[in-house]
Amino acid sequence: MDATVLWSDDGVLVIGIAFVLPRWEARLRIRAAVRAAAAQWLKMDIESISVESTPGDPPRLLLAGRAAGLSLTHDEGISLAAVHLHGAVGIDVMRVQDIADWANLARDYLGPQVAEELAACPDAQRPLRLAQAWTAREAALKYAGLPLMEWDGVALNYKVQHIALQDGFVAMLATPKTETGVGP
């Protein structure tokens, strides 16, 4: 169950592990994998790297006492972690699946514009598009340090990127907008 580096650029590292474990054990494994990957990436002693986690607060990665942005996500069989050396980060993963109550879910959590876009897309494309919209929204909320909540219309200042995964899963990464203002 080795971690795989999925993406690395400009102070951001995304790693993933595939697993067939209880969720609690996968959570422990992704935290250990984050420490190992960060140690290798930054050429640091693994003993100087720790994951700090307090219920109700986003986790933090401590690198020799200096905090870095950290976001973790899990779905059945996969865990992902994103580290950002220069600020906040959010990541989310979701299995692509048909959700019977997609219209209410989209309206309540993704907002009217996304709900309309999903209603207008072909039925066969809807599960993928819903997963993309959901993971983008949840990654943005994590980036902002906010819990999952119903749509409030507040625009979050972030950029979102797709992280390539095995078929059947979608992952999105939220990081600060660049100087050029790239992002949604």
Image (cartoon, rainbow, N blue to C red):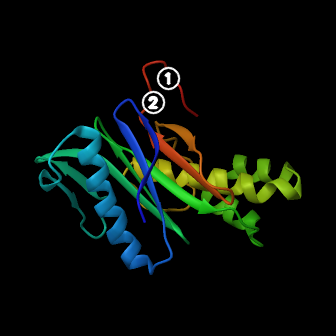
Q: Residues within 10 Å of mark 1 (few under 14, many from 20)?
A: few
Q: Is residue 99 left or right of residue 143?
A: right
Q: Quadrant of residue 178?
A: top left
Q: Residues within 10 Å of mark 2 (few under 14, many from 20)?
A: some
| Secondary element at tag 1 | loop
How many numbered marks have been drawn onto this rendered protein structure?
2
Determine which of the numbered discs, if any, sits on residue 107 in the image: none
Residue at horizontal 28 percent and vertical 70 percent from the top: 55
Residue at horizontal 87 percent and vertical 58 percent from the top: 123
The answer to whether residue 150 shows anywhere in this view is yes
x then y, percent, for residue 72 = 40, 58
Extreme residue toward the top, this view: 180
Q: Is residue 162 left or right of residue 65?
A: right
x then y, percent, for residue 174 = 47, 43
| Secondary element at tag 2 | loop
Determine which of the numbered discs, if any, sits on residue 177 in the image: 2
The residue under label 1 is 181
Quadrant in the picture for the N terminus: bottom left
Quadrant in the picture for the C terminus: top right
Q: Answer yes or no: do the residues labelled 1 and 2 have beta carbons within 8 Å? A: yes
Residue at horizontal 41 percent and vertical 60 percent from the top: 2
x then y, percent, for residue 167 = 68, 56
The amino acid pointed to by label 2 is Lys
Residue at horizontal 57 percent and vertical 56 percent from the top: 151
Q: Is 165 situated above or below 85?
A: below
The amino acid pointed to by label 1 is Gly
Label 1 and label 2: CA atoms lie apart by 6 Å
Return the residue nearer the eye: 26 or 123: 26
x then y, percent, for residue 16 = 46, 56
Return the residue nearer the eye: 81 or 100: 81
Extreme residue toward the bottom, this view: 22
